């Protein structure tokens, strides 16, 4: 068992595909919340092999895409402070803020470093004691515990020049916001597998209970997605709405309790602004008072100015699942992965990038 | 961005481990999975193990999918 190739077996995929075709009678629209799922669905052409009864829509599950311009601008303003070293995951570099991007600043001499892990950022802080390292804390519940661990580690090792800009987002509250808007009608939700590895399956229960929408937690291999769709179809056809886990090897109903404990030791919920969705209560994480000295919001005073949205970009509507990239006039001509206008084209897990890279509509 | 990759734990030292990911050995942090043991597969996300993978559940899932494939879509 290597946990990868087994879940790509085409013989098993065929079995699932024929079962889905056999079972699915009622037209249904399923949303894959997570950008990682979007990539699997496009890479393996899953939309094309599903029966005509099933429509798939992509949700807001890309932390980079949903970061509001005002927050991006804050990160960009921090990068302009001479003593600051920005440490960030790679996908953030090219995202255009209101006026410029981290990549452009870096070309002009700002110290912006791409890291793979917060562990690398801590090391940079240790090696540069006279400078300040600001790590851009972007991510969902999957990532937030790793960043919490880095803050606790900095405390342990008395690393005083390590700071985090906490722009974390929580997934269940934003799904509630999307469903409450009533803009998109869903008959099933593919719940994010690695967010659920941390939070478990219980936090999705309100969706099944209060909104009557079947929820299935899925992994990221093609068989995972197909199994998940099959389970959603079964629920739709039987008129059930429950939370089920297809990704049982990676997700327990209670989640990872140690990771949650560390996450909530360092962070507490706060309102957060989502691109295209607006402010959603309790959908963000801020650093608790106890660790304020490591919070970039408190350590540095920056004025990023007024945010401004790129003209013509439909990212906001796409993130809510009400438009597709094909509705955007800029898609594929003025906006490409080389010259992205909006974040959904920058991030490898953005919906516009998935459409572009896998040839949808070209 | 929530990408997490299965890795096999080779050795553990305190809160860190050597783990094999696709033939390459890397150091990962076990801060979030103190229960992980040598020989376990863990899901690695940005240098941290975020969960221990469950071998039995994986086999059970594959068994189920094999049954479905054997039925050839006749049942439902
Ligand atoms: S194609 Fe480009 S401009 Fe259009 S919505 Fe997507 S990211 Fe925005």
Image (cartoon, coloured by chain):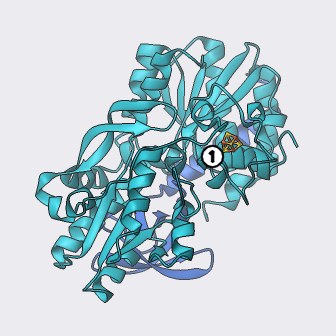
- Which residue is at 73% across, 12% downward? A26
Palette colour of chain A: cyan
Find residue A6 and report its image quarter.
bottom right
User: Residue extending furthest front?
Assistant: A305
Residue A65 higher or lower than A212, as above or below: below
Evaluate whether residue B50 shows in this view: no
- Which residue is at 25% across, 59% downward? A301
Toward the viewer: A186 or A160?
Answer: A160
- Which residue is at 77% across, 36% downward? A329
Residue B10 image offset from top left, x and y in percent: 46, 80
Residue A180 higher or lower than B73, as above or below: above
Toward the viewer: A324 or A140?
Answer: A324
- Which residue is at 54% across, 61% downward? A101
Evaluate whether residue A134 shows in this view: yes
Q: Quadrant of the N terminus of chain A?
A: bottom right
User: Residue extending furthest bottom?
Assistant: A127
Toward the viewer: A11 or A269?
Answer: A269
- Residue behind mark 1: A344
Chain drawn blue, letter? B
For disc 1, the neighbor class at 10 Å (few under 14, some 14 to 19, many from 20) is: many
| B62 left or right of A327 in image | left
Toward the viewer: B55 or A261?
Answer: A261
Badge 1 marks a residue whose secondary structure is helix
Residue A298 higher or lower than A103, as above or below: above
Residue A174 image offset from top left, x and y in percent: 43, 31
Find residue A299 and report its image quarter.
bottom left
Q: Chain of mark 1?
A: A
User: Residue extending furthest left?
Assistant: A290
């Amino acid at each position: 068992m290597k946990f990868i190739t087994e879940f790509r077996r085409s013989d098993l995929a065929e079995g699932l595909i024929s079962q889905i075709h056999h079972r699915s009678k009622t037209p249904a629209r399923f949303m894959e919340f997570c950008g990682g799922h979007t990539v699997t669905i496009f890479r393996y052409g899953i939309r094309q092999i599903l029966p005509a009864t099933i429509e798939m829509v992509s949700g807001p599950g890309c932390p980079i895409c949903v970061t509001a311009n005002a927050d991006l601008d804050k990160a960009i303003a921090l990068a302009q402070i001479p003593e600051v070293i920005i440490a960030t995951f790679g996908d953030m570099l090219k995202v255009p803020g209101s006026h410029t991007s981290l990549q452009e600043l870096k070309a002009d001499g700002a110290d912006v470093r791409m890291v793979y892990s917060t562990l690398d950022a801590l090391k940079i802080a240790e090696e540069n004691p006279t400078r300040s390292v600001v790590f851009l804390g972007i991510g969902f519940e999957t990532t937030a515990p790793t960043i919490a661990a880095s803050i606790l580690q900095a405390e342990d090792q008395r690393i005083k020049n390590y700071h985090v800009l906490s722009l974390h987002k929580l997934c269940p509250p934003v799904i509630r916001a999307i469903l409450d808007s009533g803009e998109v009608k869903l008959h099933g939700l593919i719940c994010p597998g690695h967010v659920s590895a941390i939070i478990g399956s219980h936090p999705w229960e309100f969706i099944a209970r209060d909104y009557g929408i079947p929820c299935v937690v899925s992994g990221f291999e093609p068989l995972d997605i197909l199994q998940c769709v099959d389970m959603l179809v079964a629920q739709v056809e039987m008129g059930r709405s429950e939370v089920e886990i297809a990704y049982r090897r990676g997700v327990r109903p209670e989640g990872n309790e140690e990771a949650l404990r560390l996450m909530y030791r360092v962070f507490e919920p706060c309102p957060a602004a989502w691109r295209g969705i607006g402010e959603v209560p309790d959908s963000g994480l801020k650093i608790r008072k106890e660790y304020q000295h490591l919070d970039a919001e408190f350590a540095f005073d920056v004025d990023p100015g007024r945010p401004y949205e790129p003209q013509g970009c439909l990212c906001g509507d796409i993130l809510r699942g009400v438009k597709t990239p094909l509705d955007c006039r800029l898609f594929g001509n003025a906006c490409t992965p080389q010259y992205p206008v909006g974040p959904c084209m920058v991030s490898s897990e953005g919906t516009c990038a998935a459409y572009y890279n896998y040839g949808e509509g070209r | 961005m929530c990408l997490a990759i299965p890795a096999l734990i080779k050795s553990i030292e305190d809160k860190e481990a050597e783990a094999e990911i696709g033939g390459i050995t890397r150091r990962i942090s076990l801060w979030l999975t103190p229960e992980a043991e040598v020989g376990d597969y863990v899901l690695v996300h940005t240098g941290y193990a975020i969960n221990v993978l469950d071998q039995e559940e994986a086999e059970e899932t594959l068994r189920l999918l094999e049954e479905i494939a054997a039925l050839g879509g006749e049942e439902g």
